[in-house]
Amino acid sequence: MSIRGTWLCSWMLLGSLGCAALRTPPEETAPPVAPEVVRADLHVHVTMRAALGPLFQGEPGEGVLAGSHAERFVNQVDAAALRRAGVRLILATVWPPPATRPGRGALGEALHQLAELESFTRRNPDFVLAHGAAEARRKLADGQLVLIPAVEGGEGIRRVEDVDLLYAAGARSITLVHFFDNPLADAADDQFGAAVGGLANGRDGGLTPLGAQAVRRMLQLGILIDVAHASDRTIEEVLAIAGPAGAPLLYSHTGAGWAATRCLSTPLAQRIAAGGGLIGIGLFRSPFQEVPPSERWEGFQPGTCDDDVAHWLHYARQVGPEAVLLGSDFSSAILRARPGGACPQGLRHTGDLPTLFAALEAHGLSRHTLDNSGERLLRLLETVEGRADPSVLPSARKLPVPRDDLFLERVAPLPRNQ
């Protein structure tokens, strides 16, 4: 990330900081689902406090939850609430912030965040890690909340071997880019709106030569490739590599692409779904886009979770309901739905998911489609793992993972829970 990008990110985070927190469990807004149901969430920042330090308050298990939709820097994830909503399979996304810590570069920060995720599960028995579909199935059968480690942003990948290091550290899904262009690929422009886009936008392109090599290495290792935040050309070029290899893609969190370039266009959504991929609906309220009148219903309230329902229904119509599931982006510093519409309390935290799911059912999405989302994610993981090259996996699994930046002196490898 450039100095300009780092400054912009820091300014936006500080400008939207919330400071209040509830220390009471979320109220039950709907009857719990059956215990055998496994719904999935494609994008949750379970350990955001590890990334943002004193800016972020609380983590799951501490009884600290955002008290309103406006509290962006307060934990939004609660284990009991996830169980009531049936969400038991999660891509637990770590976000390596700009590499500003002494002695730790972008790759070192990503490895550190993956280690922090493992540390979180060791001190919080409500959650367990799984590093593949088979392991996830076993732990789900035991009734556990299962986290699949994911990394948002490939800024730390400066050579193909770095993909192996991330795999050895536990990553099983990698988002190629985040808000800014990086050594792998071009990010979508205007993700903060056109007014800020002039400061943040970079090149107009797709994959770099290194990016193409990294994508092929991810396929060899059975790593799920997430094209959220990527430019259209980047997505097209990843599809051109992954499609012939029979590997489906993930777009982990989006809203319907009516006006904002951050969001996924219908043609690309259809291509991802046609290849067996999945599209996650992010629960972010964008000030840069509005649901068009043709997508609204009587009593529709903009700025509420009605927007999120409309996004979900839009993609379900365009690509089929089976390709669309939750990609909440909870515990990210985003605007979320305010109270009103189908969600009287707004979307404050995972305790409000049953209300959202009930609204989706009320608008025609079947209970089976919602309840089956975990199985669809497991099948996706199995397909990607099945395309891996068995000859490269043993060496990648045994690779020592340094504690700090790759270019500094290596110290004792991190403990790995694999």
Image: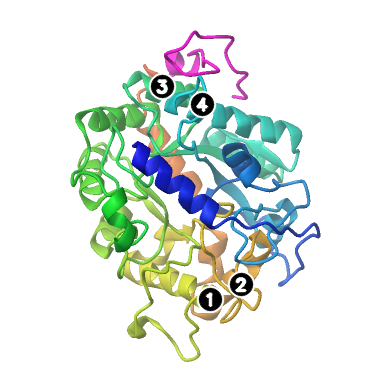
**Magenta run includes residue 409:** yes
Measure the alpha-carbon separation of dots 4 and 1. Answer: 37 Å
Q: Answer above or below: position of 297 versus 398.
A: below
Earlier in the chain: of badge 4 and badge 1, it is 4
Q: Are marks 1 and 3 in contact (CB under 8 Å)?
A: no
Question: Can residue 277 be seen at all in this image of the molecule?
Answer: yes
Earlier in the chain: of badge 2 and badge 4, it is 4
Q: Amino acid at mark 4?
A: Leu
Percent x, y of residue 159: 31, 21
Q: Nearer the viewer, residue 165 or 418?
A: 165
Q: Are marks 4 and 1 in contact (CB under 8 Å)?
A: no
Q: Amino acid at mark 3?
A: Asp
Q: Nearer the viewer, residue 50 or 353?
A: 50
Percent x, y of residue 97: 49, 38
Front label number (1 vs 3) = 1
Measure the alpha-carbon separation of dots 1 and 2. Answer: 6 Å
In the picture, measured across the screen, residue 49 lies left or right of residue 261, that is right
Percent x, y of residue 201: 27, 49
Q: Are marks 1 and 2 in contact (CB under 8 Å)?
A: yes
Magenta stretch in the rendered image: 393-418
Q: Residues within 10 Å of mark 4 (few under 14, many from 20)?
A: many
Q: Residues within 10 Å of mark 1 (few under 14, many from 20)?
A: many
Q: Which residue is mark 2?
A: 346
Residue lying at 30% horizontally and 56% vertically, measured from the top left: 197
Q: Which residue is mark 4?
A: 111
Q: Which residue is mark 3?
A: 164
Earlier in the chain: of badge 3 and badge 4, it is 4
Measure the alpha-carbon separation of dots 3 and 2. Answer: 41 Å
Q: Which residue is mark 1?
A: 304
Q: Are marks 3 and 2 in contact (CB under 8 Å)?
A: no
Earlier in the chain: of badge 1 and badge 3, it is 3
